[in-house]
Image (tube, rainbow, N blue to C red):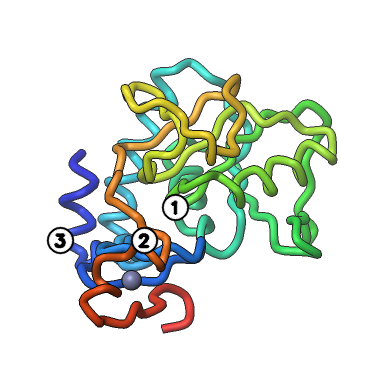
């Protein structure tokens, strides 16, 4: 599975001058919803991710995604793993389980995102789940932005990574393109204005 090629084929790896959620600027942007808009492509990608998780031998009872970004990937991964799919939603700076979803004490939960950058949303989802007594056994995303250490990669975790080092993180590849603080952004210096992609456009 060449996940970068899947993003390119889906026109989901955008080139330009982007303002990211972190406030940094970048020449590239990953629009994961575009990769997952094709259910057949979503199935193939999540099957590949599920294979990595199955090979690890980790027992997963349920996949939980932070809404909205992780929901499609989480649902498709759960289908591939043959387990239940739930999601948590934003509440007061954290996340909470709603809509009648429940978890059992000690239930093995995998937290799934579309892309893991520093893992902030994934950690909020994990905290919400663990507060209910379930156990987070793994994290997963389609691709890793290179701040956290994924299983099978030589890239080490950077200080910005919020994921715990003792819980495995599965992703299909590292997408490590550069980000710049606005004052150091070469595109800004050339006079171009960063646009905010993603959920609002
Ligand atoms: Zn810029």
Residue 110, compared with residue 101, is above or below; it is: above
Say whether disc 3 or disc 2 marks the residue closer to the N-terminus: 3
Which quadrant holds the C terminus? bottom left
Q: Is residue 61 left or right of residue 14?
A: right
Spatial distance from mark 1 to mark 3, Cα to Cα? Answer: 17 Å
Residue at the outermost top position? 57
Image location of residue 12, percent across then percent down? 26, 65
The answer to which of 184 and 156 lies nearer the viewer is: 184
- The residue drawn where x is 46% and y is 29% is 157
Dot 3 falls on a residue whose secondary structure is helix
Mark 3 Cα-neighbour bin, 10 Å: few <14, some 14–19, many ≥20: few
Question: Which residue is the site of mark 1?
Answer: 114
The answer to which of 109 and 2 lies nearer the viewer is: 2
Question: Which residue is the site of mark 3?
Answer: 9
- The residue drawn where x is 35% and y is 29% is 51
- The residue drawn where x is 30% and y is 61% is 35
Q: Is residue 88 left or right of residue 197?
A: right
Q: Are marks 1 and 3 in contact (CB under 8 Å)?
A: no
Say whether disc 1 or disc 3 marks the residue closer to the N-terminus: 3
Mark 1 Cα-neighbour bin, 10 Å: few <14, some 14–19, many ≥20: many
What is the number of the mark on residue 100?
Answer: none
Q: Are marks 1 and 2 in contact (CB under 8 Å)?
A: yes
Spatial distance from mark 3 to mark 2, Cα to Cα? Answer: 12 Å
Q: Is residue 110 left or right of residue 90?
A: left
Image location of residue 9, percent across then percent down? 15, 61
Question: Which residue is the site of mark 2?
Answer: 32
Residue 132, compared with residue 58, is above or below; it is: below
The answer to which of 170 and 166 lies nearer the viewer is: 166
């Amino acid at each position: 599975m060449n996940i970068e090629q899947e993003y390119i084929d889906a026109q989901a790896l955008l080139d330009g001058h982007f303002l990211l959620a972190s406030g940094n600027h970048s020449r590239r942007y990953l629009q994961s919803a575009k990769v997952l808009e094709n259910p057949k492509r979503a199935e193939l990608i999540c099957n590949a991710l599920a294979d990595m998780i199955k090979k690890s031998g980790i027992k997963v009872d349920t996949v939980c995604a932070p809404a909205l970004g992780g929901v499609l990937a989480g649902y498709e991964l759960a289908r591939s793993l043959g387990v239940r799919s739930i999601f948590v939603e934003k509440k007061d700076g954290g996340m909470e389980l709603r809509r009648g979803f429940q978890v059992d004490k000690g239930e093995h939960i995998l937290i799934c995102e579309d892309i893991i950058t520093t893992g902030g949303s994934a950690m909020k989802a994990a905290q919400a789940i663990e507060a209910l007594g379930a156990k987070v056994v793994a994290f997963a995303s389609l691709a890793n932005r290179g701040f956290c250490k994924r299983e099978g990669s030589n890239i080490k975790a950077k200080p910005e990574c919020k994921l715990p080092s003792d819980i495995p993180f599965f992703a299909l590849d590292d997408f490590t393109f550069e980000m710049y603080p606005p004052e150091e952004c070469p595109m800004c210096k050339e006079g171009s204005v960063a646009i905010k992609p993603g959920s609002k456009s």
